[in-house]
Image (cartoon, rainbow, N blue to C red):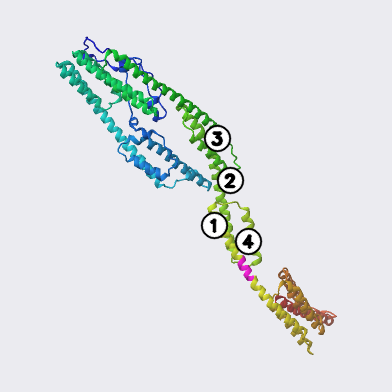
Amino acid sequence: MTEETNSMTPLENVPDSSTLPETAEHAEKPENVENQHVENAKPVAASEEQFLESETPVLTDESHEEEEVETAEDYSTYSREDLVALLETYVNEVEVPRFKARIAAIREFLNHAFVSENESALNRFIEEGGIKDDFAPVPDSLEQRFLQAIKRFNKKRIEYNEKQEKQRVENLTAKNEILTLLKDLIQNEDNMNKAFERFHELQAKWRAIGPVPSANVKDLQLTYKFLIDKFYDFIKINRELQDLDQRRNLETKISICEQADQLLFETSLNTAFRKLYQLQDKWRETGPVPRDKKNETWDRFKATCDKLFEQRKDFIAEADEKRGKNLEAKTQLCEAAEGFKWDEAWKHKEWQDATIKVNEFQTEWKKIGPADKKVNDEIWNRFKTACDAFYKAKNDFYHKRKQELAANLQMKTELCIQAEALQNSQDWKMTTAELIRLQQEWKKTGQVIEKQSEKIWKRFRTACDAFFHNKTEHFSSQDKVHDVNLVLKLELIEAIENYVAGVDSHISFEELKSFQRKWSEIGMVPLNKKDEIFKKFKTAIDAQFDKLKMNSGDRQKMKYHERPENNRHAEAPRKMDDDRRHLMNKITELKSEVQLWENNIGFFAKSKNADKLKSEFEEKISKAKEEIKSLKDKLDMVKE
């Protein structure tokens, strides 16, 4: 570009941006939005002419954020409630982009907090026997506030962006109008002073107009530059006025250089490049300077830009090195997670300890920054696959465990039902044995869900305790009755020992039998006294019977009368049943013989020795009937 030219170029031949040489280098897209101005930056061209024909990267909405919000803040000291309140405050601000970085940082921190809480709740649910697919997080009012705030922010940001885009379109229209006015000024204004005044007025208006759509930036800048050049070519301004204008442009460009120099001390490289873009735009919009100062001012500005780009190279190299280290650290974590082994035979405690270890892997992962964008997703999927494999095995264990716990609960419930059916039983011996058997079965059943364990055990124990309490009370009262019976039997033994038989032995025999009946009626005595007291009774009653002159039948009656007391032990009921059956069979047998004998007597009349045979059978019948009567008496005593 030359500062003066005498040839006229038609305005209709304004060059199109697509025909211009591309002189700037291309930097790769940044991974971190915060540093997009640094990593998107393009070094300035070697010559000022090439620089003026290039375009400045379009500043995004984020580039308007104030520097104070770019500084990372430690939110770990805040409570969730404080962070949500702070988020709501930022979202309610009128200037949407101003707090975008802080909102993003708070959102990321809270997202991790809520996800971590949900994961902890899920783990507790699974540990208590729940199935992962059945898990439903408990509604969190704080999380709802957080989501509503983010929703409002996104809405406001969309509205802001739409408004900004609309403004850019309006700015494009306004700048196109200025281009039209510049073109008309160059072609139609003859008054040099007035033309120059109008020219500066249009320049001021151009600078005051904000950004335009990115697709129109380059063409707009080229057209504006072309018209500025043509203005100095077409207007035959006197040298004094032109020199004055160039000196003013020199002052502006020196000021731009000074501002650029200050950027070398800017702590935020992102902010430095954002401001550098603005200075580059201002340099392009400023007219030519005196020819002898042209190279000097340009070299100074370019040198400062080059220094900033050297800082940018160092920044990118450092960022690449950090991403490399992050990738190495994440690879080691992947290997640790993949090498972590578990055993399907593990119990609850071992799964708990293993979960703590895997959670430590995940916590460590969160502390590591991102790797290179090309491999970041791949390394994350590798780590996630290893963790998911562990949690699937853990979920399978707790699913199986839940089924086992449910089966154990069913078995214990059935034992409770059986115990409750026996709790009011008074068959002390049989029920005691059955409840002991149920208690042994209870010990064989496994664990149940923790929240059901105490409840089901209390139910079973209550039923068992109810029976054994009743049993204790029953035998406690029986012990008192036995003590009273002991006293009564001692008194009865004393009465037997002091008894004096009368003349009639049959009467005395009946009185002694009365003593025996009273003995049986009194009932049980304490077990440790049973044999001793019965021995005393038998000795006393036998001594009295020995004093009587009785036939063998009477003695048999006495023996049968003694047996009920003598057989009060575990086998007595069975032995008495055997006696009853024996006596009844014997009576039936004798009755059959008597009937047979009586039938046979009718045949004796035709016999020579009829009378003798008849007499013998009659004697047999008589003895059999006496024996039947004696057996019936014995049977009655056994029944008593």
* Of callouts 4 and 1, the N-terminal one: 4
Q: CA distance from mark 1 to mark 2?
A: 23 Å
Q: Which residues are magenta?
A: 468-474
Amino acid type shown at disc 2 = Lys
Q: CA distance from mark 4 to mark 2?
A: 33 Å
Q: Nearer the viewer, mark 1 or mark 2?
A: 2
> Helix, strand or loop at disc 3?
helix
Q: Residue 558: image x %, image y %?
A: 77, 79
Q: Which residue is mark 3?
A: 337
Q: At x 57% / y 62%, what residue is drawn?
A: 462
Can you tell which quarter of the image residue 314 is in? Answer: top left
Q: Residue 470: image x %, image y %?
A: 61, 68
Residue 349, numbered label: 2
* Of callouts 4 and 2, the N-terminal one: 2
Q: How many C-alpha atoms fall within 10 Å of the one at disc 4: few (<14), some, or many (≥20)?
A: many
Q: CA distance from mark 4 to mark 1?
A: 19 Å
* Of callouts 3 and 4, the N-terminal one: 3
Amino acid type shown at disc 4 = Leu
Q: Nearer the viewer, mark 4 or mark 1?
A: 1
Can you tell which quarter of the image residue 554 is in? Answer: bottom right
Q: Nearer the viewer, mark 3 or mark 4?
A: 3
* Magenta-drawn stretch contains 287: no
Q: Which residue is mark 1?
A: 455
**Nearest the eye: 547 or 604:** 547
Q: Residue 209: image x %, image y %?
A: 25, 27
Q: How many C-alpha atoms fall within 10 Å of the one at disc 2: few (<14), some, or many (≥20)?
A: few
